[in-house]
Amino acid sequence: MNDRGLVRSHQGFTRRRVLALGAAGTAGALAMLPWPAAAQLKLDITQGNVQPVPIAIPDFSGGTPADTEVARGITQVITANLKRSGLFAPIDPAAYIEKISNIDAVPRFPDWRAINAQALITGRVTRQPDGRLRVEFRLWDVFAGNQLTGQQYFTTPDNWRRIAHIISDAIYERLTGEKGYFDTRIVFIDETGPKDRRVKRLAIMDQDGANVRYLTRGEDLVLTPRFSPSTQEITYMSYGQGDPKVFLLNIETGQREVVGNFPGMSFSPRFSPTGQQVIMSLQQGSNSNIFVMDLQSKRTTRLTDTAAIDTAPCYAPDGTRICFESDRGGKPQIYIMAANGGAAQRVSFGDGSYSTPVWSPRGDFIAFTKQTPGQFAIGIMKPDGSGERILTSGFHNEGPTFAPNGRVIMFFRDPGQGASLFTIDVTGRNEQKIPTPSFASDPAWSPLLQ
Amino acid sequence: MKAGWTISAIGHAAVLAWGLVSFSTRPLNATPPESLPVDIVSATDFSQLTKGVKTAPKAEVQKPLVEKVAEPKPSDNPAPKVVEKKPEIVATAEQVPPKPEPEQKKPEPKPPTPAPQAKPEPKQREAFTKEEPKIDPIAEAITKDMKKPDPKPEKKAETPTPPKKPEPVKPQPKFDANRIAALLDKREAQRQSVTGATLSQHPSLGVPTGSAASLTQSEIDALRARIQQCWSPPVGLADARDLIVVVRIRFNQDGSLSQDPSISNLGSHPLFQVAAESALRAVRRCAPYSFMPVAKYDVWKDVEVTFDPRDMFRG
C-alpha cells in the first residue's frame, strides 16, 4: 500500500510538472514572438449606451440684425431636427460657458467639456453683395479637440430653412455614419371640417411640419399620395365624379393627368424606383389585380391574374421585386413576386391581417399595417418574412412610410376624432408627433431633395 | 431405454459437475483498473503557471524593481533582526537541559501513544544512530523536530513545575514601565524597500506579468462598464456589423490618460472613421478612470479595448 501510494504521488508529481513545463513552454514561445508592444489588458466592449449624444449648438452669428434673426432661425431648426431624431440631446444654451463670437477661432474645448458636450456646432450667416445669404458651419469634436467637418452654402434669404435642413443632414451623417433625412418633404392628406363631411386636400410640407402648401382645393376626395423618386411629381387616387382614378401631379407646374384610361376604378398607385413606371391596382369585377404602366410609352402590363383582391403594390429599392397585399389565402397577407410578375410567395404568417406593405429604401425591412381584432399596429419584418416586430399598436395606426435613410417610419394615428402624423424609429423608440395645421392622414415621405 | 436414460443422466450430471468445478474455480474477477492520480489545477493556478518571460535575462536580485524612485533613506540602526531572535534560541536552550538524554525521554512518550506502531520504530532507529559516536546533524535536527511536539503534552500532563522554573528566569531584563519607550524598535521601517534606486525597465524572470497583481473580474468589469456607459455607438453601425475598432489606451497612475488613445486596427469600411471617432470619444469622455486600483497599476497601465457593436443591433 505504502509503495503504491508513493508511486502514485510520484506520478502525480511528474504529470503536474509536465503540465507546468508545457504551459511555461507555451508562454515562453508566445513571449518570443515579435510582439513587444502588446497591451497587457484586453477588453471587449460589446454594448454601448444608446443615450442621445449631448451636443451644443450656440446661435450662429450674424452681421446685421436681420441676419442675426435668420441665423437664430437656422440654429433653432437645426436644434429641433437633431433633437427630433432622438439620437442627439441639444444642451440648454443657458449652460454654455464660452460665447462663440468668431467661428474661425478654435473654441475653448474645456469649457464645452465641462458641460459634457460631445460635439459643438458653430456657424455664421453673412449677406453677400448680391443679396444672397452665405451660411457657414463647423462641427467640432469636443473631446478630441478637432474639427470634424465644415461647409458653407449660398442661398436666397427666403430659402434659409432648407439650408438649415441641409446642415442638419451633414451633421447627422458625420456623427452617425448614416444619411440624413431632414432635407425632405412629406405629402399627406389634410383633413378639415366636421367628421361626416370631411374636406380632404392634398398637402405638402417640410418633414418638420413647416412650409405647408395645399396642392388640391378639396372638391374631390383624395387618397394615398406617393412621391416620385425625382420628388417633383406625386401620384395619388382621387374621386370626384365617377370611378376613383389614379392621377399624376407635377408639384412645380400644378399640371394634373389621369394615369391610364381604364374601365372601373384604379387605386393604390406607387412609383417604381426609376420613376419611369407607376404600379397600381385595377378593379375587375369584385377582384382587383396589379398592373404596371410605363409613363413614357403608356403601355400597361398585367402582373397578377387571380380571383382575389391584390392591391397595395410596392417596389423593392432595386426594382427587381414587388411586395403587395392579397387575400388569396383567405385573409389579407403580404406576398412578394418578381417585378415582371410570376409566382408570388407569401411572407407574412402572423395572426391577423396585413396590409399597406412598403419596402424600406435600404431594402432591409418591409413595413406594414397589421390588423388584429380591435388593434391596428405598425410593424416591420425582413423581406423574407422573418423578424417581425411591432413598433406601435393601438386603436388605429395605419399607412407606414419610410424616411429616405430607412431609419424612421411615419404613419398616421386616429384615436377617434381625427388623424395626425407620427414618426417612430425602426427600433420602436422615439415616437414623435408631427405638427400639422389640422387633421392629417396618409403621409408619404419624399426622397432627399436634389 | 433404461440404459439410455442412465447414460443420459450420467452424462448430464458429468457435464453439470464439470461445469460447477471448472467455473467455480475461476470467478469472473474484474481486474481493478489502475487508478490515475488527478490534480485539480484551478484556472488561476494555471494562468499563473504561464506567467513570466522565459527568455528574459535573469535579473540581479539585489535591487527590487519598482515604479517609483524614492530618496535613499539611510537607516539609523541597520542591525539585523537575527540578533534579537537569539534570546529565543536561548530560551529553547534552557528547555534543552532537561533533554540531554534523548533516550530517556523517548521511552516516556511511548506508553501514552502505543497505538501507532510505525512511529516508535523510526524513533528507535534514531535512538540507535544517536548511540553511535558520530553525531549526525541531520538526525539531530530530526530528533529535535520530533521532540518539539512531544514535550508540549509532557509539560501539561506530567511535569507542570519544571517548565515554570525557566519562565521566572526570563524576566531577567527587568521590566520598567517608565522605560517602555526603550523597547520600541527604532529601526527604519522595512517597507521602504517598495521604493528603490532603479526603475524596472526590462522584464526579468517572471516579474512583469507576475500574477500577484492581476485585476479581479469586478475591477475589469468596472472599467468595461465605465467605457460602455460613455460609448454612444453611431446608429450607422447597424448596417456594418463587422465594424470593429480596437483602441489602445495608456493610463497614468491616477487613472488619467497618459497619451491620447490611439486606434490600433485598420478598417476599409467607409464608416470606419465614424466608428473609430465614437470609440475614441468614449475613452476620452470617461477619463479620468480614478477608480482603478493603484496597487495594480502595472496591469492596467496599458489596455487594449475592442469596440464591437455587433450584439447591439442584432434582431
Image: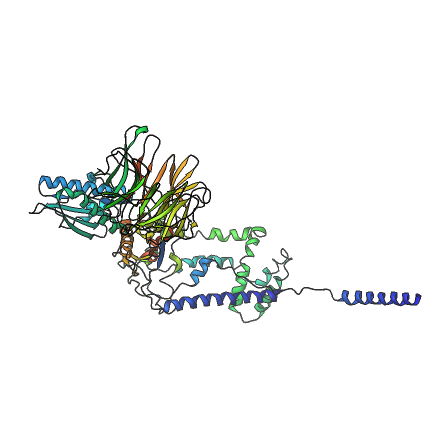
Relative to A141, B89 lies left or right: right
Q: How is the image coloured?
A: rainbow
In front: B27, or A200?
Answer: A200
**Depth order, front residue of B293/A270:** A270
- Most extreme residue toward the right is B2
Relative vertical location of residue B144 with respect to residue B238 in this rendering, above or below? below
Q: Position of residue A286 (x, y in %)?
A: 41, 40
**Count of numbered marks:** 0
Residue B124 seen: no
Q: Nearer the viewer, residue A59 or B66?
A: A59
Q: Position of residue A321 (x, y in %)?
A: 36, 52
Q: Position of residue A210 (x, y in %)?
A: 22, 38
In this view, the residue in front, B285 or A415, is A415
Q: Is residue B100 above or below residue A326?
A: below
Residue A184 location, quadrant: top left
Residue A73 seen: yes
Q: Quadrant of residue B186?
A: bottom left
A318 left or right of A134 in image: right
Q: Which quadrant would residue B139 be assigned to in this image?
A: bottom right
| Residue at 38% over, 48% down | A323
Judged left or right of residue A198, residue A20 is: right
Which x, y percent locates residue A380? Answer: 38, 45
Image quadrant where one finds the N terminus of chain B? bottom right
